[in-house]
Amino acid sequence: MSINWFPGHMAKARREIEENLKKIDVVIEILDARIPVSSHNPMLDDVTKDKPKVVVLNKKDMADERETKAWISQLQKEGKHPVAINGRDSQIIRKIEPLAIEATREMFEKMERKGINRRAIRALILGIPNVGKSTVINNIAKKKIAKTGNTPGVTKRQQWIKAGTRMELLDTPGILWPKFEDEETGKKLSLTGAITDRVVSLDEVAIYGMNFLLEHDKDTFNKFYNVNADIDDDIVEIYEAIGKSRGLKAGGNEINYEAVTNRIIYDIRNGKIGRYTFDRTVD
Ligand SMILES: Nc1nc2c(ncn2[C@@H]2O[C@H](COP(=O)(O)OP(=O)(O)OP(=O)(O)O)[C@@H](O)[C@H]2O)c(=O)[nH]1
Ligand SMILES: [Mg+2]
């Protein structure tokens, strides 16, 4: 299964990103820390080629801390420049900038050897929907929009934001389309809010999430919903129990299964139950 539901947008997004890449030195790819693999579009590497990259695992406050640590060291081993952040923290630029400096060091040294003066590192933020691109940009921008950086012409609305001491950031992110070739990835993208609701079956998404929690954090799940469920239990029975404890009735005493599905997805997406990482480093 390969789902490309916006083929037109895809081509347009790619063109825009390619256009922006010419102006920048480093790509800051924002991933969702809960799904560091599933929120990465492999097309990115194809489009950005060998541009230096920083990998940001955002929403770390919603992900499993141990997994985030493991992902960071794995990405480091792969030679990436990773950092985990909460996009809403005020000091994120202090975490991102050193990595951008590190990622571009070689390139700038080469330029200097050729006698080209050092200038600010220009960065572009990229990522699939809902990973926190705007949050990160707005947080870094505050009131620091660099007026001098206005680019005339086609892209006249773009501005450079002064970011940290040595960096400038393009104020508009590149939006990558989420891409998945297996249903599990689709479900993870849905559970974290990266894809629109109609693309995958919500029942399957809810059941996937529920099973994940029953496998990894059963007690918390049961306590949260005030049920006594087990991974091997009949799904309908678990639904009935949740529907009952949450008062999700369809009239009379019937359980409203759709409401149970929506509730489970809402609770997981918004981190109401706990912090979970659905792409696992090990198991
Ligand atoms: N808990 C938490 N929420 C975050 C974090 N970063 C962003 N968010 C929230 O995630 C949602 C999406 O953030 P945006 O910044 O709009 O994401 P985006 O990548 O710009 O999304 P699109 O513009 O749709 O592509 C918002 O509700 C943010 O408040 C974070 O680190 N932790
Ligand atoms: Mg946005």
Image (cartoon, helix red, strand yellow):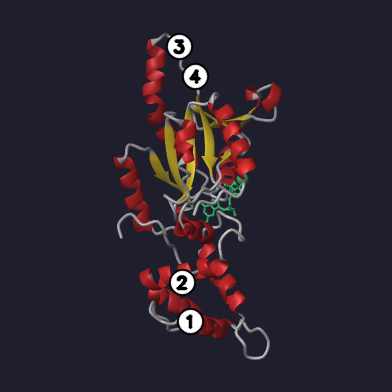
Query: Which x, y percent locates residue 23?
Result: 55, 24
Amino acid type of disc 1?
Ile
Amino acid type of disc 2?
Met
Residue at 64 percent across and 22 percent down: it is 148
Residue at 45 percent across and 42 percent down: it is 42
Q: Distance between the residues labelled 2 and 1?
A: 9 Å
Q: Mark 1 points at which residue?
A: 238
Q: Nearer the viewer, residue 65 or 46?
A: 46
Marks 2,1: beta carbons within 8 A: yes
Is 175 placed above or below 206 here? above
Q: How far apart are marks 3 and 4 (CA)?
A: 9 Å
Badge 3 marks a residue whose secondary structure is loop
Which comes sooner in the sequence, label 2 or label 1?
2
Of circles 2 and 3, which is in front?
A: 2
Q: Mark 4 points at which residue?
A: 119
Residue at 54 percent across and 46 percent down: it is 128
Q: How far apart are marks 4 and 2 (CA)?
A: 50 Å
Amino acid type of disc 3?
Ile
